[in-house]
Image (tube, rainbow, N blue to C red):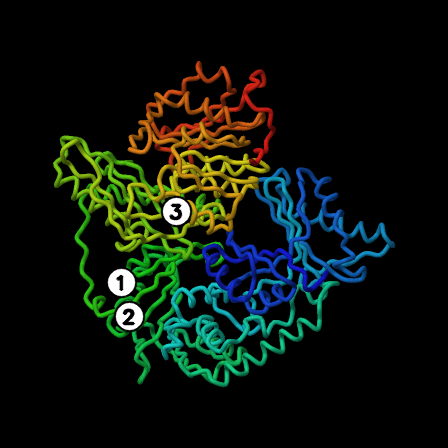
């Protein structure tokens, strides 16, 4: 392997830490960094990968992909693994191990997949010269990582060799140890580097084996988290560059020496269990930071700022009560923690990893941020606080009305039902509630930004005429309160859009003009949404699967997006491998927004055109041909700059005009949100073969509104000669 060559890598991490990992890899010097579910893709040289292994506080493993291939059966898997020249990576007398995983594939037994992979590697060596490498599952010379998803296999080298959270300093641990990379995520979310730079201290009143304090000290000292590890997965690799690695180690040792020389003694921990205090002391000694610590046996309720320390970060991981019988005692513990923080730590920051939102709520403190993090397989919530004087006397919240309590029960049920699938599929923007209870007529949408914060967009439906205006307003206030409590979102991150009654009937009131955009993730792509300034946010959540279909169909085609709005479909088409994209909209505001969405994902230049036109006028003027056309018109439009448009009346004319610009093997994806819409099949089937894709296009979180939109795939009839001879590519003028 050419050590200066740029290669693609993948860093794994626990779910909930992807955006932090992305920022960390950028800081390390990685290129092309983009987050994914439970990890991040990046590119760089071998030096970049070594630095990630040595310096990442958040990653679990650093993977170097070697091959990707279809593996619908064990023979295909065997052939694919044998297609890799293993002598480039492994000596014949060396050792290796295989970690295998599978999801949504015909081969669904991980152990069998691992054995078949092992056989392919061993047989290749035997066939070559009769020798064979051995298996070592503890510290092999190389560790092979094989992941099978939807019958597609990815084979990688695990350059870490063992999980990177194993820093090499832990001598002992408690009953429920906190992984070091999760501790690092808590410290970063709690803004510990900023607190330390401002002269603050770190205090853990339930320190256990000392993980948070030790990680905090090593972070402040600029000590590489992998510096004490004696084993990495690349040390026995045939392409390991020893000189490069030793140079990086020497640099890291020098940085740690300099950092420890100037480290301040501002680390304070206590625990009610004297055995844990002793364990924390031994771990701190092994990590080389014991001289900077003050550790005492003390109950959490007696915690207080050390003498002379005016500010800092209180950080802790209280028990969750996972064992039967313990759970009932947990709210009392969390309430006592909240009292301690409120009464004694005014002016400090705090970060608490709670078992769930309910336990966090028991502290009776106002969290400024809430992050979902995984402690092993257990989903937890990290709450961060600025402990200002306003928290000294928490106001008792008024009891919920019976109706609001019903709403809360329904919303909690919805969230429980959706959460696991949302996490499994990496969905950050979704619908949590859609007029499930007629009395509470609103839609509640969640937008998770790329910093890990959730925002809510609550939009009121038209209230029945017999509901008084003051009752409707009261119910909307209850919706905002309940949604914020259940979803753990503070009021400042909730956008509430209500209808006003006046001449012409019910309509939405004046929108804000904040010009505040948040960056969200959809299927690995970054998109901008604005929750306050417009009726719509810039991202139609019910079209998530439609955009996915566009991405699937776009490969190798020229793509036309009519009524493009903010061009989210164009971003997906470009990501799917479209040769070029053309986005057409009449609004300059939306085209500017579209430009930002495309640029945010690296899609710029002449291959991504933005055209300010009425859609029908553009089709009449344009002479290009497209292999994929997306048409998602409004129900009605009466713009002063174009003729009036009615989707029911005008859709045949619109689609026939699209046919003029469609290649022989092209596809039109046509959708709209007019619930009474009827596709005129009789008129359209002259030219098109029509597939009704409405039902498959409705996301699972919109199941209550199965008619929220319709979607059809239109392909030119083979008997229809059309008007152009071109195949899937548009001929450029």
Asked if residue 270 shows in the view, the reply is no
Residue 640 percent coordinates (x, y): 28, 33
Identified at 40% across, 20% down, the residue is 679
Residue 449 percent coordinates (x, y): 39, 53
Residue that carries the numbered disc 3 in the rendered image:
592
Seen in the image, is 412 located left or right of residue 101?
Answer: left
Considering the numbered disc 2 on the image, is that residue within a helix, a strand or a loop?
Answer: helix
Considering the numbered disc 3 on the image, is that residue within a helix, a strand or a loop?
Answer: helix
Seen in the image, is 516 located left or right of residue 138?
Answer: left
Name the foreground residue: 170 vs 456.
456
Residue 243 percent coordinates (x, y): 70, 73
Name the foreground residue: 433 vs 724.
724
**Alpha carbon separation for disc pair 1 and 2:** 9 Å
**Quick check: marks 1 and 2 in contact, CB under 8 Å?**
yes
Residue that carries the numbered disc 2 in the rendered image:
341
Q: Which mark is residue 365?
A: 1
Q: Is residue 206 above or below residue 114?
A: below
């Amino acid at each position: 392997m050419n050590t200066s060559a740029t290669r693609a890598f993948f860093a794994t991490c626990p779910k909930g830490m992807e955006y932090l990992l992305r920022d960390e890899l950028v800081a390390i010097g990685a290129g092309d960094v983009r987050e994914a579910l439970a990890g991040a893709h990046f590119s760089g040289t071998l030096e970049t990968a070594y630095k990630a292994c040595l310096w990442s506080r958040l990653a679990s493993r650093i993977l170097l992909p070697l091959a990707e291939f279809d593996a619908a059966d064990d023979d295909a898997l065997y052939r694919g693994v044998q297609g890799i020249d293993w002598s480039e990576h492994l000596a014949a007398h060396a050792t290796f191990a295989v970690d295998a995983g599978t999801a949504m594939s015909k081969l669904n037994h991980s152990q069998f997949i691992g054995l078949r992979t092992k056989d392919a590697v061993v047989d290749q060596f035997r066939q070559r010269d009769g020798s064979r490498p051995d298996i070592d599952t503890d510290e092999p010379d190389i560790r092979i990582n094989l992941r099978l998803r939807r019958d597609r296999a990815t084979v990688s080298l695990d350059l870490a060799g063992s999980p990177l959270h194993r820093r090499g300093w832990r001598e002992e641990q408690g009953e429920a140890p906190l992984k070091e990379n999760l501790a690092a995520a808590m410290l970063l979310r709690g803004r510990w580097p900023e607190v330390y730079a401002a002269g603050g201290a770190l205090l853990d009143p339930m320190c256990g084996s000392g993980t948070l304090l030790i990680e905090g000290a090593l972070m402040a000292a600029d000590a590489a988290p992998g510096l004490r590890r004696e084993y990495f997965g690349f040390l026995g690799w045939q392409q390991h560059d020893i000189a490069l690695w030793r140079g990086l180690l020497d640099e890291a040792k020098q940085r740690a020496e300099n950092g420890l020389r100037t480290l301040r003694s501002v680390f304070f921990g206590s625990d009610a269990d004297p055995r844990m205090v002793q364990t924390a002391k031994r771990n701190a000694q092994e990590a080389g930071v014991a001289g900077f610590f003050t550790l005492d046996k003390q109950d959490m309720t007696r915690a207080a700022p050390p003498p002379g320390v005016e500010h800092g970060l209180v950080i802790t991981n209280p028990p969750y009560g996972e064992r039967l019988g313990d759970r009932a005692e947990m709210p009392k513990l969390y309430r006592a923690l909240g009292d301690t923080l409120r009464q004694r730590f005014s002016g400090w920051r705090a970060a608490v990893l709670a078992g769930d939102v309910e336990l966090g709520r028991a502290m009776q403190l106002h969290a400024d941020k809430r992050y979902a993090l995984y402690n092993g397989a257990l989903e937890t919530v990290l709450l961060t606080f600025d402990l200002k004087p306003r928290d000294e006397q928490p106001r008792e919240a008024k009891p919920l009305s019976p109706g609001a309590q019903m709403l809360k029960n329904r919303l909690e049920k919805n969230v429980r039902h959706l959460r696991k699938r949302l996490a499994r599929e990496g969905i950050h923007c979704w619908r949590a509630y859609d007029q499930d209870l007629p009395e509470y007529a609103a839609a509640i949408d969640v937008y998770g930004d790329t910093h890990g914060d959730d925002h809510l967009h609550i939009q009121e439906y038209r209230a029945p005429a017999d509901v008084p205006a003051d009752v409707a307003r009261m119910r909307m206030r209850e919706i905002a309160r309940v949604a914020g409590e259940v979803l753990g979102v503070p009021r400042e991150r909730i956008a509430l859009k209500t209808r006003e009654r006046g001449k012409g009937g019910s309509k939405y009131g004046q929108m804000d003009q904040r010009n505040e955009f948040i960056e969200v993730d959809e299927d690995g792509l970054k998109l901008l949404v604005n929750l306050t300034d417009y009726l719509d946010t810039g991202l139609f959540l019910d079209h998530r699967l439609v955009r996915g279909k566009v991405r699937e169909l776009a490969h190798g085609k020229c793509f036309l997006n009519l009524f493009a709005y903010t061009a989210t479909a164009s971003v997906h088409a470009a990501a799917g491998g479209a040769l070029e994209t053309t986005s057409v909209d009449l609004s300059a505001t939306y085209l500017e927004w579209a430009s930002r969405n495309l640029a945010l994902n690296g899609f710029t230049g002449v291959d991504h055109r933005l055209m300010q036109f009425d859609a029908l006028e553009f089709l009449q003027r344009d002479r290009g041909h497209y292999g994929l056309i997306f048409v998602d018109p409004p129900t009605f439009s009466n713009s002063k700059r174009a003729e009036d448009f009615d989707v029911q009346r005008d859709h045949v004319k619109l689609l026939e005009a699209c046919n003029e610009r469609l290649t022989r093997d092209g596809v039109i994806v046509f959708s709209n949100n007019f619930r009474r819409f009827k596709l005129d099949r009789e008129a359209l089937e002259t030219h098109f073969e029509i597939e009704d894709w409405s039902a498959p296009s409705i996301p699972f979180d919109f199941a209550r509104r199965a008619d929220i939109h319709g979607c059809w795939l239109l392909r030119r009839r083979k008997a229809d000669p059309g008007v152009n001879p071109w195949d899937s590519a548009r001929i450029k003028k």
